[in-house]
Amino acid sequence: MEDRYELYYWPMLPGRGEFVRLVLEEAGAPYVDVARLPKEEGGGFEPLQDFMSGQRPGQPTYAPPILVHGDLVLAQSAAICAYVGERHGLAPDDPGRRKQALQLQLTIADVSDEAHNTHHPISATLYYEDQKEAALEASRSFISERMPRFLGYFERVRERSGGPWLMGEALTYPDLSLFQLLEGLAYAFPRGFAKVTESTPSILALRDAVAQRPRIAAYLESDRRLPFNEHGVFRCYPELDLGD
Amino acid sequence: MEDRYELYYWPMLPGRGEFVRLVLEEAGAPYVDVARLPKEEGGGFEPLQDFMSGQRPGQPTYAPPILVHGDLVLAQSAAICAYVGERHGLAPDDPGRRKQALQLQLTIADVSDEAHNTHHPISATLYYEDQKEAALEASRSFISERMPRFLGYFERVRERSGGPWLMGEALTYPDLSLFQLLEGLAYAFPRGFAKVTESTPSILALRDAVAQRPRIAAYLESDRRLPFNEHGVFRCYPELDLGD
């Protein structure tokens, strides 16, 4: 099977699609970010809607990101990252170690979900403005309790691995996702993040090392990289950046 | 490596550990549910705390469930289910199809997380009683919008696969987890669940077929099976079973 991938994700936000893009970019794999093509070349929302409405063949997908590779249609960012990472040397070879890479990826996804929950604690289907009071409480708890526990955990993983990466000497796809998670938390909660990461120097160094990988550095400079904004997982609402 | 597994999970609730137990049971794999052993045989909270405090060697784990298999220490229920499922013929052989099984598992985990969120919308670190008003709102949205979308999705997956299982003719580990998810939703929201599942007959039939698998039927009758209660993911708070 040739190594040409199609990625389908909301074109106006980095969101969970960005975890996938970083793996494709570090792998140097050719891919088309379909929804970001001009509309006359098949971009926009329409190709995404074909998945949502069940027009596409293959196992149905609940939500983007969606990867198409030959006949394979695959959703869920952690499953996609594992699939691409394992095909391109960005995951261990041993079956047990592969699942340990997935374990790290799923815990990164859990933090992302909780970060999303800070601005949408009641429901993803309501507006932020309609759940703002709950969002203040959720953010306070996230910054003072959850973020320190989660980032402290990744610091311990990195320290025990011997480094420079989460699983040791070889970079794996969760390293790329941890970079994105840390960038997102720093964007959403600049004060809270600065305080919490005073005690996690190793994962800050890992973040910087990811940014300096030649392919990632080139990607971050390109217009393929979408900036954070207030439509995605990580949103900068200054009123939620609560430190105690 | 011999096929003896150790499972570490909170001994008083089914929670996310139950997804793992069902795979081990259907596989017929020998395992010890360590924390449920009598205290004098090494059970109770102590072995769990050894993981939480970093006393155990291996890649650190953030939270139970945790599987130990030889030297491997693995957390995150979806990663554990995939690991055990792939070793015991409860997952496809093809790498892409394996990731599609994981995709289904991760969407089941998403529904579980949202079900947990109905009673803990603000934070997992606060008591239910301290976030009850937000829980009412979250439950209303979950029952009227999220649950129908999610269960409708699994109904489409099952219909498109040709059945009798989510991925076609062979049972895979997400089938076992979908059984547990449906049991949990029926326990937590009996009225809401009955209404939503009027339009999802195929996954109700799948749930019944899982319960009739000989090994699962024997397990459900045994005292290894923990009943749902108000400490786990799926809790029956009648005030949250809101139908509109």
Image: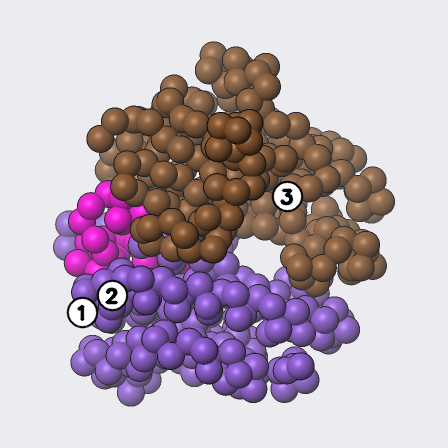
Chain colours: A brown, B purple
For label 2, the residue is B162
For label 3, the residue is A233
Among the 4 quarters of the image, the one containing residue B19? bottom left
> Which is closer to the viewer, label 2 or label 3?
2
Helix, strand or loop under label 2: loop
Residue B242 image point, x, y percent: 65, 81
Q: Amino acid at mark 1?
A: Gly
Note whether A206 is above or below B48 in the view shown.
Answer: above
The CA span between labels 3 and 1 is: 41 Å
Q: Amino acid at mark 2?
A: Gly
For the residues tagged 2 and 1, is the chain the same?
yes
| Drawn side of residue B59 relative to residue A182, left or right | left
Query: What stretch of residues is rendered in magenta?
Result: B76-100
Q: Residue at x 36, y 38 (%)?
A: A68
For the residues tagged 3 and 1, is the chain the same?
no
For label 1, the residue is B28
